[in-house]
Amino acid sequence: MFLLSFQYAMKVINLSKAPEEERELAVREANLLRDLNHTNVLRYTDSFEANGALCIVTEYCENGDLSEYLDKRNKQKMKLEEDRLIEWFRQIASALQVHTCSVITYIWQIIVHCTC
């Protein structure tokens, strides 16, 4: 018999005093994660409301997330290599199955102008 152990992460979004627009964005985020199924996107496990907060449960990323990585690079004043940016862009486009040229151009402009 095998005993499997899994770690999860939970994002807690306090909605108790949030305006309606912020509440809708939080629910959209949970729904988007639930509907995405791709190797380059966190695996969604569950979402629920408790004590005025929306809780989104996902797989745990042992090495942190992209935001943490970029923050660390910024603090160290280290620029990202173009090859890495291109690979991330490819992964993001693949995960979102982006087909619209204007959206791809917009995302590319954000990546190219990143101060990381």
Image (cartoon, grey):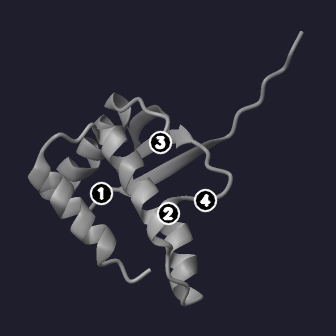
Q: For the residue labelled by badge 1, is the local secondary structure a helix, a strand or a loop? A: loop
Amino acid type for the residue under numbered disc 4: Gly
Q: Residues within 10 Å of mark 1 (few under 14, many from 20)?
A: few
Q: In the rendered image, which residue does mark 3 sit on?
A: 40
Q: Are marks 3 and 1 in contact (CB under 8 Å)?
A: no
Verify CB contact (< 8 Å) between mark 3 and mark 2.
no
Residue bearing the label numbered 4: 64
Q: Earlier in the sequence, mark 3 or mark 2?
A: 3
Q: Nearer the viewer, mark 3 or mark 2?
A: 2
The CA span between labels 3 and 4 is: 14 Å
Mark 1 to mark 4: distance in Å? 27 Å
Q: CA distance from mark 2 to mark 1?
A: 39 Å
Which x, y percent locates residue 6? 71, 33
Instruction: Determine crowd level at label 3: few under 14, some 14-19, many 20+ residues with C-alpha closer than 10 A.
Output: some
Kindly identify which residue carries mark 1.
Answer: 16
Judged from the image, the secondary structure of the residue bearing numbered disc 3 is: loop
Q: Are marks 2 and 1 in contact (CB under 8 Å)?
A: no
The nearer-to-camera label among 2 and 1 is: 2
Amino acid at pointer 2: Arg
Amino acid type at circle 1 is: Ser
Q: Where is mark 2, residue-wise?
A: 84
Give the alpha-carbon distance from disc 4 to disc 2, as whole Å. 17 Å
